[in-house]
Image: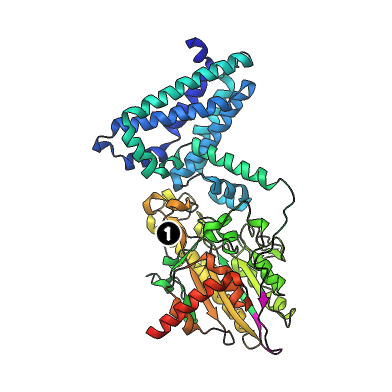
Amino acid sequence: MWRNIFNPQNRWVAGVSAFLMLLANGSFTSRLVQAYPLSDGNVLFVASVFLLFTLATTLLLVWLCHGRAAPWVLALYLIASSMAAYFMSTYGTVIDQTMLENTLQTNAAEAGDLFSISMLLYLLVLGVLPAWYVLRRMPRAKGLATELRAKALFSVCLLAGMVLLIVPFTSQYASFFREHKSLRFYANPTYFTYSAIRLASSKIKGSAGPVVVQAVAPDAALHDEPPLHPKELIVLVVGETARADRFALNGYTKPTNPMLGKEDVVSLGNVTSCGTSTAVSVPCMFSLAGRDGFDGDKVNQFENVLDVLKRQGVEILWRDNNSDSKGVALRLPYENFRDPAINPVCDSECRDTGMLVGLEDHIRKHPGKDLLIVLHQMGNHGPAYYKRYPPEFERFTPVCKTNELSKCTDEEINNAYDNAILYTDHFLAQTIALLKKFDSSHETAMLYVSDHGESLGEKGMYLHGAPYVFSPREQTHVASVLWFGKNFDYRTDDLRLVKDYPFTHDDLFCALMLTFEVESGVCTQRTNALKAHFEQQGQTR
């Protein structure tokens, strides 16, 4: 019986599981030891947790590997786990559903920024070579019935082993599952398997049939204006990966905003993002649902604020120098400025300032119309920050000139990142200069807000995309800058009254409605709260 339970197939699965736990779980192990220091007498408990996850991985793979497909499944897991191990160990990344969604949406240029020799070594040593060995040597199962019986008995043994590992440490496991939930996010490959299943399930549900877009704010109505009243001309810049604490306008010691510092702008210093990745934050900030109600699987079933404004006759154009609009501009004019054939300002890559070319003609072609232009930046997209700006903006040195951030000093990483902020400062100043040309004929304004922030090595984390439940402030505290022209309904001095107000991405929907003087009951509560704050600040001024 024991030979049947521990047959060659089950032994191979157990061996691969042990291999993955020992060599592809460095991030999980280091965080486990940080939470339960070995010096505090936690050696046996840490060993128990490590063995528990090994048995859990074995149980997972046993039921995923069947017949002739078993070696291929194990080979695939070895390769996928090697990549997960690299990104978790190098950048502190969590491979959750959102991160997998980001991976599916990554274009070739973004993928190229992530490629490195270290990644290749991880793939080769932990993935390709072990996978090749499994495909060459793993024996085939001897009949379906025999295989299933062996799997069932082996699973009983695995479950019994898991119980025996938990029982002596019941109180510590209670603490582990209650207070250290984030640790399981780093378990490789169990957590990314769970995330992949959730992602696949959502995709299947989403492809069940044609999407019928439901209207939001059906009571929206444009406020009556005198016939000769200037029309709105608003440029909304959606930034990429820009932290609020790296703007000199917010008190940062480096001069990262030399151009904006010369303009009459207001930097909102207390803005929180809806998510920690572009795939979540961009559709969320345009949605009425807000962060608490946002559902990435259903967001495209409802209108966003741009759809509502379009219904009111606002002429909208989306220009994109990032990956895409994440579904926001599906029903709007859209221009891809990642394409050198469209973007005239390209060197090693296409630059954000290229999105300004031709906008003056676009504005003049729509006289008598309210205009909203959305510019989606490449901004500070990492980890190759040094690529995000032209050479003449490399003013903070030395600079990290590789995407392998672990090979650079903190100073080099921060300098590269800050140089990219410096280029965004230039881009926003150029946007304001364009709007000033129409300051007499329109109500002009620029609204800038980043989609999310970025970790630059704080607490061992890099990049972004951490699960929101434990995401650091560096990834959620985003930069936001506003500029108003002379005809705009609100004065810059008035806005300074709320520069420290706790805004979130949830406010963008109603802010745009208010900007274009579109009234709706869905914005009444938020607008009233903001007006009350204005009045309170005005009285104490």
Task: Estimate the x, y position of residue 267 in percent, counting from the top left.
Answer: 46, 74
Q: Nearer the viewer, residue 98 or 154?
A: 154
Q: Is residue 91 left or right of residue 105?
A: left
Name the dominant secondary structure of the magenta segment: loop
Question: Which region of the structure is painted magenta?
Answer: 221-232
Q: Is residue 176 left or right of residue 495?
A: left
In this rendering, is residue 133 above or below 420? above
Find disc 1 in the rendering and name its residue. 474
Task: Estimate the x, y position of residue 336 in percent, counting from the top left.
Answer: 68, 62
Task: Estimate the x, y position of residue 494 in percent, counting from the top left.
Answer: 48, 83
Quarter where residue 327 is shown: bottom right
Give me the residue at 32% from left, 36% from top: 172
Can residue 259 be seen here? The reply is no
Q: Is residue 128 magenta?
A: no
Can residue 452 be seen here? The reply is yes
Q: Quadrant where the C terminus lies?
A: bottom left
Give me the residue at 25% from left, 34% from top: 41
Amino acid type assigned to the residue bearing label 1 in the image:
Glu
